[in-house]
Amino acid sequence: MHFRSRFFSLLGLSTVLLQLTAAAPPALPGPSNSDGSVQCLALSALLGDKVLYPNGSMYMSSVQSYWFQEARLSPSCIVRPTSSSDVSTIVRTLAKLRGVGPNNTFAIRSGGHTPFAGAAGTAQGVTVDLGAMNQVSVSADRKIASVGSGSTWSDIYSQIQPMTLSAVGGRVAPIGVGGFIIGVEASAQSKSDLFAALKGGSNNFGIVTRFDLQTVSMGNFWGGSIYYPSTTIPQQLSAFNNFMQLANFDPNAELVQAIGYISGVGSLVSNGIYYTKPIFNPPVFQPITDIQPQLGSSMRLSTVSDFVTETEQSQAINPR
């Protein structure tokens, strides 16, 4: 889905380096300096228990919460900032210790939903987990939702839904706003101001700590999923082709069609159907909803929060 983001706060990589004490660091749990944990020890001295080590339950909880098993790496430590000031401390410290020790890499995590290893974590070094920065606030005029970069879309939807507001974003509850929003391309022709700002940044311009999202008015609307046997595939493809014709375009309609296999069930077709108005079975979807037989249906009037949670529950955490 397309989204509009008016503002995000960046903390640049400053050339002003934090002066770390020359005294020996305090005794801390976790790996020794020889394991490449100089950065972790320095961060512990500054941020205390916001730095997590492999022998701790919170460390394991963070690692296991990645959606895909391939992405569950084991950094020397995980640091969980709770403010922009903490993020500034982390950036300055890592800049000061750049290149020190064998395992001096670092990575940034928002939601941790990307499937491949290294997208939101590091196998060694420091992973900066922004999950504790998940605050959500709405401006007085209700036009802007300011969200921390560790928020998930379920955090946002659930907090602004009572105001009959929403924001255009992810359709699965645990997706993080960071990876979803900042996957942008910049060039001299497109987003030229960002392109100029990034020159010389070596792709490490800064860490986003807040996004300001334009809100939209949104109450209950019609949506859900319908499941069919694979014998309906010819009808499904014909209906999908009809839905995609320009003459049938409806800006309120979204269709996600999937053909798959479930052990013990066999091949089937799933249609995720959403219409952003409280209208039951609008004409644009009737060629699809009329297909029979149907194995099951969850079509109903409900909220964004409810629909994204349903989508999450239908997608088990990848065990691979």
Image: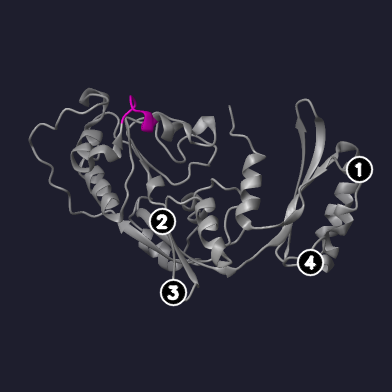
Residue at 48% across / 62% down in the picture? 187
Work out whether residue 273 can be spotted: no
Q: Which residue is mark 1?
A: 293
Q: Earlier in the sequence, mark 1 or mark 2?
A: 2
Distance from disc 1 to disc 3, alpha carbons, whole Å, reads 49 Å
Q: Which residue is mark 4?
A: 249
Residue 270: image location, x then y, percent:
78, 43
Quarter-wise, where is residue 68 in the image? top right
Q: Which residue is mark 3?
A: 140
Q: Nearer the viewer, mark 4 or mark 2?
A: 2
Task: Return the residue found at the far front.
Answer: 162
Residue at 20% across / 44% down in the picture? 96
- Kindly check if marks 4 and 1 are in contact, taking CB atoms under 8 A apart as contact: no
Q: Secondary structure at mark 1?
A: loop
Task: Return the residue found at the far bottom.
Answer: 141
Work out whether residue 58 can be spotted: yes
| Range drawn in magenta | 53-59
Q: Which residue is mark 2?
A: 135
The amino acid sitting under disc 3 is Ala
Residue 121: image location, x then y, percent:
42, 37
Q: Residues within 10 Å of mark 3 (few under 14, many from 20)?
A: few
Residue at 53% across / 30% down in the picture? 69
Quarter-wise, where is residue 51 in the image? top left
Q: Earlier in the sequence, mark 4 or mark 2?
A: 2
Q: Nearer the viewer, mark 4 or mark 1?
A: 1
The amino acid sitting under disc 2 is Gln
Q: Earlier in the sequence, mark 2 or mark 3?
A: 2
Distance from disc 4 to disc 1, alpha carbons, whole Å, reads 26 Å
